[in-house]
Image: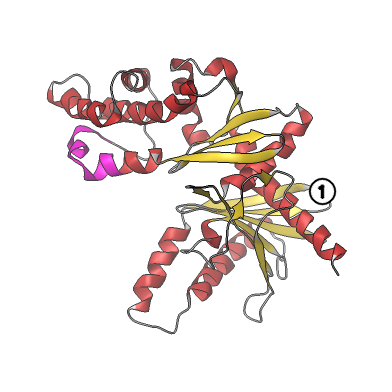
C-alpha cells in the first residue's frame, strides 16, 4: 500500500478531506469546508447552459484538486500520486458518477461494498476509489454506512452489541438497525431539511430567528425541551402551528422559538425509538447536534439504553471506515490477480 491515503467524506452540503499515514495508522491532518456535492452539481448545471463542453466529472475533479492543494500546503507534504478514497454523495446521480447500491443485509467488515476505481490521469495525478451506498426496500443511504463501518471497528475495543440501533443525526437523519455484525435495515428522517424549510420558507419564518451558531443558553434549551415534550402530545402537522402561536401570543422570543421548533422535530424523529423494542441505542453525532439530541433522548426516557459515542470519534469514523473498505478492496484484488 502507498505511504499515504487521501480520505474524503463528501456530503450533500459538506466536504472533509483527511491525510492518512499508512505507517502511523492514523489521520495526521485534515481540512473541511461547505463545498458539498449539491453546490458543485448546481454549478455544473448552470455551466451547461453556456458551455456544453464541461463534463460533470471534470468539474468535480477540479474541485478535488483545489482541496488537495490546500491540504498539501497545510501539511507541507507533496501529495502528488496519492490515491483518493471517497464516500458519501460523490457516487450518487448528482456526484462524480452514479454507482449502484449494495443490498441489505450488509456486512460491516467492509468487504461487500459496491465501488469503482478510476486511474490517475495526466491532468489529475490521483487514482480515485469511489464508494457507493446501501439500499433497502424503500430507502437508501450514502455515507453513513461507511461511518458505521468505522464506528463498528472502534467498538471492538469496548465490546460490540449483538444488535442495536445507531442514530446518525443530520439533514437526513438515519436510524440503522444492526444485528449479528450486519446492517439489516434503516430509516431516514428529513429532520434537518424540514427545519430549514420551515424556518426559511414557511409561514413560521417570521416566528423564529435562526443563526448558524445559536447560543445554547438556559432559556433556549428550556424552549427546546418544551418542544420535545410537545411532540409527544399531538401529531406533528398539528403541533407545528404552535410555533406560530408562541410568537403571536408572546410566549417566547424568536430565538427561543427556533429551539422550540427544533425540539418539535427532533422529538418527533426520536419518538420512533420509543415504539421500538428495547434494543441498545448508539448516538453517533457530530458536535453541532450532539448536545440537542442528547437532551432530547433524556427528555424522552431513552438515555438509559443509549451509548453516546463522542463527537470526536464520530467525526473520524468515516475515514476509519474508508481505510477499512479500501484495505479490503486491495486484499480482494490481490486474490483475483
Residue 83 image position (x, y, % from top left): 71, 65
Say which residue label 1 marks: 24
- The residue stretch that appears in magenta: 197-209
Q: Residue at x 26, y 35 (%)?
A: 209
- Residue 198 colored magenta? yes
Q: Quadrant of residue 197?
A: top left
Q: Quadrant of residue 313?
A: top right
Residue 137 image position (x, y, % from top left): 51, 47
- Numbered label tally: 1
Residue 135 image position (x, y, % from top left): 55, 50
Q: Circle 1 — which element? A: loop
> Overall secondary structure of the magenta stretch?
helix
Q: Residue at x 40, y 83 (%)?
A: 52
Is 91 situated left or right of 275 in this image? Answer: right
Q: Residue 2: in sight, yes or no? A: no
Against 266, residue 4 (above or below) is below
Farthest left residue in view: 248
Farthest front residue in view: 137
Q: Quadrant of the N terminus?
A: bottom right
Q: Quadrant of the C terminus?
A: bottom right
Q: Residue at x 69, y 70 (%)?
A: 127
Is 231 situated left or right of 165 in this image? Answer: left
Q: Residue at x 67, y 55 (%)?
A: 113
Is 234 situated left or right of 17 in this image? Answer: left
Residue 152 image position (x, y, % from top left): 70, 37
Against 227, residue 178 (above or below) is below
Amino acid at each position: 500500500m502507498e505511504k499515504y491515503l487521501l480520505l474524503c467524506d463528501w456530503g450533500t452540503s459538506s466536504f472533509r478531506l483527511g491525510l492518512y499515514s499508512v505507517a502511523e495508522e492514523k489521520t495526521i491532518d485534515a481540512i473541511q469546508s461547505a463545498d458539498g456535492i449539491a453546490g458543485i452539481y448546481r454549478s455544473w448545471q448552470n455551466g451547461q447552459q453556456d458551455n456544453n463542453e464541461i463534463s460533470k466529472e471534470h468539474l468535480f475533479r477540479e474541485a478535488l484538486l483545489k482541496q488537495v492543494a490546500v491540504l498539501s500546503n497545510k501539511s507541507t507534504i507533496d501529495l502528488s500520486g496519492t490515491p483518493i478514497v471517497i464516500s458519501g454523495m460523490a457516487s450518487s446521480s448528482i456526484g462524480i458518477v452514479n454507482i449502484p447500491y449494495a443490498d441489505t443485509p450488509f456486512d460491516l467488515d467492509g468487504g461487500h461494498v459496491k465501488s469503482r476505481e478510476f486511474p490517475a490521469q495526466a491532468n489529475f495525478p490521483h487514482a480515485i476509489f469511489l464508494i457507493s451506498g446501501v439500499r433497502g426496500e424503500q430507502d437508501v443511504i450514502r455515507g453513513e454506512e461507511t461511518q458505521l463501518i468505522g464506528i463498528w471497528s472502534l467498538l471492538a475495543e469496548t465490546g460490540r452489541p449483538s444488535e442495536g440501533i445507531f442514530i446518525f443525526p443530520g439533514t437526513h437523519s438515519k436510524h440503522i438497525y444492526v444485528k449479528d455484525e450486519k446492517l439489516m435495515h434503516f430509516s431516514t428522517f428529513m429532520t434537518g431539511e424540514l427545519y430549514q424549510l420551515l424556518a426559511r420558507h414557511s409561514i413560521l419564518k417570521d416566528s423564529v430567528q435562526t443563526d448558524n451558531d445559536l447560543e445554547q443558553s438556559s432559556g433556549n434549551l428550556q424552549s427546546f425541551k418544551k418542544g420535545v415534550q410537545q411532540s409527544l402530545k399531538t401529531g406533528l402537522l398539528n403541533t407545528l402551528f404552535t410555533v406560530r402561536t408562541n410568537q403571536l401570543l408572546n410566549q417566547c422570543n424568536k430565538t427561543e422559538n427556533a429551539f422550540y421548533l427544533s425540539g418539535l422535530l427532533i422529538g418527533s424523529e426520536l419518538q420512533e425509538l420509543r415504539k421500538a423494542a428495547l434494543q441498545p441505542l448508539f448516538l453517533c453525532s457530530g458536535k453541532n447536534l450532539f448536545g440537542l439530541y442528547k437532551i432530547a433522548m433524556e427528555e424522552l426516557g431513552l438515555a438509559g439504553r443509549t451509548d453516546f459515542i463522542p463527537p470526536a470519534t464520530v467525526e473520524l469514523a468515516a475515514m476509519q471506515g474508508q481505510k477499512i473498505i479500501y484495505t479490503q478492496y486491495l486484499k480482494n484484488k490481490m486474490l483475483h490477480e
